[in-house]
């Protein structure tokens, strides 16, 4: 199988049209030849008519195809195409006329073959010009088309097609039926000629150009029409091709549409600046609403706002006054005005009604605008619109003109709309940057959380004689609870639990200071009293005035089976005695670290010691557990903690811890949110 | 929720705290004390009869004035603490530094 080459309609129709034209010429020349030589005519006029119709259709197909390929050419280009074809036809027709004038009465001028050839050339050019122009007009008529217009146009095309075949009935003789058809087509053309929606979209300059081109088309159409009519009176043609209803109707249409376009464009000239202005406003509006893209800021929006408002109102001066932090006013985007005159006008505005009614603090500024006269040597009228974002006046736009009453209703409306749109853009931008900022803080807090988690030990020091485990949960991302252990010597352990006053970030910072203090002090192997005393001195220098840290510091000696401890304002340790199967709080006196920051603090330190046996439990915790509240506002409390420990004393340290946590969570309930950081450390002795 | 009332019963200034003191409203207590100091109060009675809860941040406010009061010889007495709230003062050890009385008459007598 072989592939057929894709049919190129344009080229094929062009070729066929040329062939048709040549055969048309040949038929006529044969006819003349037979006539001159006195032979009987063998060619009936119907052959010419058929070829003529074929030629029209082929030209139509060719131009239709070529126009569709250049769908997006602008109006001016299109009209120029029509005008250039017209110009060509005009020049050729004119040239032929000149040629015959030059020949005068010579024999050549009388030669029927030559005159017939020229007749056919002009016929072809006129057909091409009219058909191509009609197709261009179709494009213009169907610009911003409605269904009705499309139907109208299709009916017109059908009518034109019918008019081609009219020649078979009428034989191109001017009679009443011909006239009737022509008038009908003329009326139809006139109704189509009101579809001129493309004209307003031309700029002022384009309108001038299109007027020029349209006049060329009108001139060409008129001249060629007259030329064709002159042929119908002469006896050159044996078969009259040009008096066809189709050509006459078409030229009427082309002429009428060109004329109406010409006139409408001409009358549109003075108002075209208004249309252009509106178009600019629409584009400005779009720019304002799209203006904040990532990487841009509100300054650019305000820049566009001033530009757009000034061009919409033809203002002679304009600027923005924006509220800075702390009620300072900043002047932005000054246009065509110097600082001195601007200050004069600003002062004038404060004294002149209605501008003096403007108040920065008014919550209802959104709906307000101030328009009035100015008594200034240069500027005679002014217009002020407040910029309101989120019910707050963020600034005002001031426009001034050198004429009195310079701002009309339309200007006021469009500028108010511009300002509204700019405010929306600014608001969106601010919301977006707020969201980004919040997101960044969240990220930072997450980092802080990770860092703080790493400050709490993952493994606690111990030996085979006891188990120890710790747990901590912060109410916010970061918290102020702290626990840690350190092996001081074999069988000697330092154990600390602490709670920084307050919560959140400030507590977290102080907690890390506490950790530092713990690690430096345990180096010196202090006894609990020394530790608390020195820690108080150290913290006294770095804690804020109203902050303190409560802590319990224990010194565990597994050889002597003894714990020595100091309680510095911290929740008393809960001690479970396996032998007596009883739990009690070890409440010795003490004072929180940082409460007294002088030497008197030492008086409040009390060191105690307690011996322990196998199965005994030490529970250290922070007040978050005691103060955990349920839905009814009841605290978990000391008694409940005590009984929970008693219930679980048989379990291993980690299980006891789990049990207490689950009991606290059950107590608080699903709806309860932990209000405070809570932390605990469970120590269970095996021997 | 916390409401703070200030009354002057010469020569004493009474600061009545109702509700709960937590991290968010402890600054209000602080500014109330500041105002009383500015108006020249020398004897300060803090009425905690209707105080339901005090957080560590609230304790921090009272704590932060201890030295200043001592220096300027200003007397401060807290009275009417509920048991639960008193426990908080006690565990921290603040009851050793601040005079805490069961009721107003005891506070006035001191």
Image (tube, grey):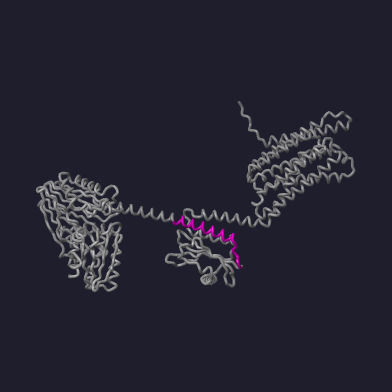
> Split into 4 quadrants, where in the image is the N terminus of chain A?
top right
Compared with A205, A223 (above or below) is: above
Number of on-image labels: 0
Residue B44 x, y percent position in the rendering:
23, 70
Residue A323 x, y percent position in the rendering:
46, 64
Residue A205 x, y percent position in the rendering:
67, 55
At horizontal 72% and vertical 34% (from top left) the residue drawn is A16
Q: Nearer the viewer, residue A595 or A468?
A: A595
Does A472 sit left or right of A49 as displayed?
A: left
**Main secondary-structure element of the magenta-colored stretch:** helix
Compared with B89, A110 (above or below) is: above
Is there any visible trace of residue A367 in the rendered image? yes
Does A371 sit left or right of A450 as displayed?
A: right
Residue A605 x, y percent position in the rendering:
15, 62
- Farthest residue in the top direction? A1
Numbered range of the magenta stretch: A404-430
Is there any visible trace of residue A520 in the rendered image? no
Task: Judge whether residue A379 is colored magenta.
Answer: no
**Quarter-wise, where is residue B7 in the image?**
bottom left
Q: Nearer the viewer, residue A73 or A642?
A: A642
Does A317 sit left or right of A496 as displayed?
A: right
Q: Nearer the viewer, residue A233 or A455?
A: A233
Compared with A1, A117 (above or below) is: below
Q: Nearer the viewer, residue A175 or A230?
A: A175
């Amino acid at each position: 199988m072989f592939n057929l080459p894709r049919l190129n309609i344009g080229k094929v129709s062009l070729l066929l049209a040329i062939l048709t034209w040549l055969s048309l010429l040949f038929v006529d020349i044969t006819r003349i030849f037979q006539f001159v030589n006195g032979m009987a005519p063998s060619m009936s006029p119907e052959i010419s008519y058929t070829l003529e119709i074929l030629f029209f259709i082929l030209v139509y197909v060719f131009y239709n195809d070529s126009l569709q390929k250049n769908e997006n050419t602008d109006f001016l280009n299109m009209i120029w195409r029509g005008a250039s074809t017209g110009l060509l036809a005009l020049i050729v027709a004119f040239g032929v006329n000149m040629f015959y004038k030059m020949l005068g009465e010579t024999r050549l001028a009388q030669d029927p073959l030559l005159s017939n050839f020229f007749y056919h050339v002009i016929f072809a050019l006129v057909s091409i010009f009219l058909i191509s122009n009609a197709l261009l007009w179709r494009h213009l008529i169907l610009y911003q088309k409605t269904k009705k217009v499309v139907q109208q146009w299709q009916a017109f095309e059908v009518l034109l097609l019918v008019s081609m075949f009219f020649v078979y009935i009428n034989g191109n003789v001017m009679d009443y039926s011909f006239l009737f058809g022509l008038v009908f087509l003329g009326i139809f053309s006139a109704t189509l000629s009101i579809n001129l929606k493309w004209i307003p979209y031309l700029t002022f300059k384009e309108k001038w150009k299109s007027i020029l081109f349209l006049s060329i088309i009108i001139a060409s159409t008129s001249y060629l029409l007259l030329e064709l009519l002159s042929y119908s009176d002469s006896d050159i043609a044996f078969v009259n091709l040009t008096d066809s209803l189709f050509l006459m109707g078409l030229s009427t249409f082309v002429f009428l549409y060109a004329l109406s376009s010409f006139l409408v464009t001409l009358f549109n000239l003075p108002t075209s600046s208004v249309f252009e202005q509106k178009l600019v406003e629409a584009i400005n509006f779009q720019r304002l609403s799209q203006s904040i893209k990532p990487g841009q800021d509100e300054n650019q929006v305000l820049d566009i706002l001033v530009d757009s408002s000034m061009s919409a109102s033809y203002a002679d001066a304009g600027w923005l006054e924006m509220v800075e932090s702390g009620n300072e006013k900043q002047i932005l985007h000054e246009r065509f005005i110097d600082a001195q005159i601007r200050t004069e006008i600003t002062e004038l505005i404060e004294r002149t009604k209605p501008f003096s009614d403007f108040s920065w603090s008014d919550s209802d500024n959104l709906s307000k605008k101030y328009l009035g006269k100015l008594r200034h040597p240069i500027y005679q009228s002014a217009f002020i619109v407040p910029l309101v974002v989120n019910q707050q006046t963020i600034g005002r736009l001031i426009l001034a003109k050198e004429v009195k009453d310079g701002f009309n209703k339309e200007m006021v409306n469009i500028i108010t709309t511009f300002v509204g749109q700019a405010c929306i853009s600014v608001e969106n931008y601010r919301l977006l940057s707020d969201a980004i900022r919040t997101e960044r803080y969240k990220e930072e807090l997450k980092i802080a959380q990770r860092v703080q988690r790493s400050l709490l030990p993952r493994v606690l020091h111990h030996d085979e004689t006891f188990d120890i485990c710790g747990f901590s949960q912060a109410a916010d991302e970061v918290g102020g609870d702290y626990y840690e252990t350190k092996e001081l010597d074999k069988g000697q352990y330092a154990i600390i639990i602490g709670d920084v006053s307050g919560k959140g970030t400030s507590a977290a910072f102080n907690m890390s200071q506490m950790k530092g203090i713990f690690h430096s002090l345990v180096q010196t192997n202090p006894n609990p009293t020394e530790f608390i005393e020195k820690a108080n001195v150290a913290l006294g220098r770095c804690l804020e005035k109203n902050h303190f840290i409560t802590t319990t510091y224990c010194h565990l000696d597994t050889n002597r089976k003894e714990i020595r401890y100091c309680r510095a304002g911290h929740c008393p340790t809960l001690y479970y005695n396996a032998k007596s199967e009883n739990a009690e709080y070890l409440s010795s006196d003490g004072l929180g670290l940082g409460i007294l920051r002088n030497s008197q603090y030492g008086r409040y330190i009390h060191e105690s010691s307690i011996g322990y046996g196998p199965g005994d439990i030490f529970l250290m915790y922070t007040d978050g557990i005691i103060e955990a509240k349920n839905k009814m506002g009841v605290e978990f409390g000391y008694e409940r903690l005590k009984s929970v420990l008693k219930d679980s004393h048989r379990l291993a340290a980690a299980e006891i811890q789990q049990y207490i946590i689950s009991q606290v969570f059950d107590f608080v309930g699903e709806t309860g949110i932990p209000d405070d950081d809570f932390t605990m450390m469970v120590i269970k002795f095996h021997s | 929720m916390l409401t703070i009332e200030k009354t002057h019963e010469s020569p004493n200034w009474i600061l009545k705290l109702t509700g709960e003191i937590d991290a968010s409203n402890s600054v209000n207590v602080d500014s109330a004390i500041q105002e009383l100091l500015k108006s020249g109060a020398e004897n300060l009675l803090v009425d905690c009869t209707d105080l339901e809860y005090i957080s560590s941040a609230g304790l921090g406010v009272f704590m932060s004035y201890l030295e200043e009061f001592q220096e300027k010889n200003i007397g401060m007495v807290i009275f009417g603490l509920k048991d639960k709230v008193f426990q908080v003062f006690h565990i921290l050890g603040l009851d050793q530094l601040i005079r805490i009385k069961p009721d107003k008459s005891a506070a006035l007598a001191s």
